[in-house]
Image (spheres, rainbow, N blue to C red):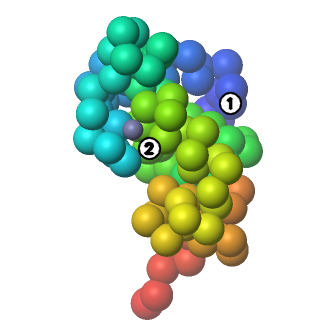
Amino acid sequence: MRKIMFDYGKVRNRYLKTHKVCKVCFDTPGEWRYGTRVEIHHIRGKLGSLREDERGFLPVCRRHHIMIDNNKEWARSHEYLCEKGRWHVPFENEEFPA
Ligand SMILES: [Zn+2]
């Protein structure tokens, strides 16, 4: 069984080493610009295995992370946020059409 939560720090750090560009503005935020580097937004939330599942990650700058959290309809229309029915649904529980 996978460890949940415990390894998130490692998963995050490894992911951010190769994802340095915000997917909203395509900028590479440095400390000098937005006060922080790229963060991981969780497109489906952080419940259970979703916390560590890279399929639900979106690298974003601080500014756009806040914008996504505050403008859910806008975020959904750009696929920065999952459809309502998929929130907190792990990828392994996804039902694919036959
Ligand atoms: Zn951005």
- The local secondary structure at tag 1 comes to loop
Q: Is mark 1 within 8 Å of ligand 1?
A: no
Q: Residues within 10 Å of mark 2 (few under 14, many from 20)?
A: many
Quadrant location, ligand no. 1: top left
Furthest residue in direction top, as rendered: 32
Furthest residue in direction front, as rendered: 33
Residue at the location (68% across, 26% down)?
5
Residue at the location (49% across, 41% down)?
64
Whether residue 88 is visible to the viewer of this picture, yes or no, is yes
Three-letter amino acid code at the position of disc 1: Ile
- Residue 81 occupies which quadrant of the picture? bottom right
- Residue 51 occupies which quadrant of the picture? top right
The residue that mark 1 highlights is 4
Whether residue 53 is visible to the viewer of this picture, yes or no, is no
Q: Between disc 1 and disc 2, whose residue precedes?
A: 1
- Residue 78 occupies which quadrant of the picture? bottom left
How many numbered tags mark residues here?
2
Task: In the rendered view, tell whether residue 31 sits above or below residue 15.
Answer: above
Q: Residues within 10 Å of mark 1 (few under 14, many from 20)?
A: few
Q: Nearer the viewer, residue 12 or 41?
A: 41
Using residue 97 as the reference point, say whether residue 25 is left or right of it. left
Three-letter amino acid code at the position of disc 2: Leu
Q: Nearer the viewer, residue 70 or 1?
A: 70
Using residue 65 as the reference point, say whether residue 55 is left or right of it. left
Residue at the location (50% across, 49% down)?
56
Q: Quadrant of the N terminus?
A: top right
Furthest residue in direction bottom, as rendered: 98
- The local secondary structure at tag 2 comes to strand
Give me the disc on residue 58: 2
Q: Nearer the viewer, residue 76 or 34?
A: 34
Q: Nearer the viewer, mark 1 or mark 2?
A: 2
